[in-house]
Image (cartoon, rainbow, N blue to C red):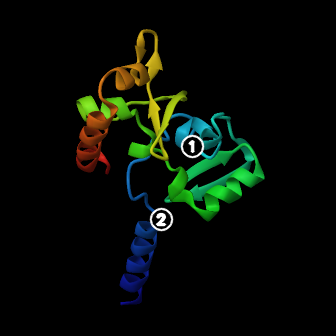
Amino acid sequence: MRKIIWILFLVMGALGYSQSIDYNTKKKGYAVNGYDVVSYFNNKPMEGKEEFTTTYDGVNYKFFSKGNMEKFIAKPKVYLPKYGGYCAYAVAVNGKKVNVDPETYEIRDGELYLFYNKGKNNTLQFWLNESPTDLKTKADKNWEKIKN
C-alpha cells in the first residue's frame, strides 16, 4: 500500500511541474530561443544571459539583466509570448506550430507576437499586410486546438 501511495505522489508531483501548453523551446532549450521576453517591451529584443535564468510553467527563460528577470518573476503572464512563442501567422493561417526568428516580432495590444522570417518569407509582413485583427481571431481559435 505504501508503494502505491508513493507512486501516486510521484505522478502527481510530475503533473504539477508539467507545462500547461506547448511552448516553443526547440532551439537552445529556452523559450524564445533564449531571448529576454521583457526586453521586447522596451523595443529592443536582447539575448538573455545564463546567469539570469528562471523557470515558469515548466519552461526556462533567460534574461539580459537581473532587473528584467525580476520583472518577469513578479508578473510572468504580462511578458509571455502569444501561442507559446510559435509563429503567430502560421498558427492563424495553417493551425501549425512553426519556429520563429526571435528578432521578428510585434507588440500588439500589450502582447508579444513572434514570427518566422527567412528568405522571402517574412510572416510579420504577411501578418501586417493582411488583417492582423482577423488573423489574431483565427490564431486564437486554432491555438485552442493545438496548444497541448
Disc 1 + disc 2, Cβ < 8 Å = no
- Viewport quadrant of the N terminus: bottom left
The picture places residue 116, in percent across and down from the top left corner, at 44, 25
Camera-nearest residue between 33 and 125: 125
In this rendering, would 100 be left or right of 69?
left
- Residue drawn 60% across the image and 39% down it: 40
State how many labels appear: 2
- Label 1 secondary element: loop
Confirm whether residue 96 shows in the render: no
Confirm whether residue 11 shows in the render: yes
The picture places residue 125, in percent across and down from the top left corner, at 41, 20
The picture places residue 93, in percent across and down from the top left corner, at 25, 29
Q: Earlier in the sequence, mark 1 or mark 2?
A: 2
Q: Is residue 20 above or below residue 88?
A: below
- Label 2 secondary element: loop
Place residue 36 in its image quadrant. top right
The three-letter amino acid code for the residue at tag 1 is Tyr
Report which residue position mark 1 lands on: 30
Camera-nearest residue between 52 and 5: 52
- Residue drawn 46% across the image and 73% down it: 13
Place residue 88 in its image quadrant. top left
Residue 17: mark: 2
In this rendering, would 37 be left or right of 52?
left
Q: CA distance from mark 1 to mark 2?
A: 16 Å
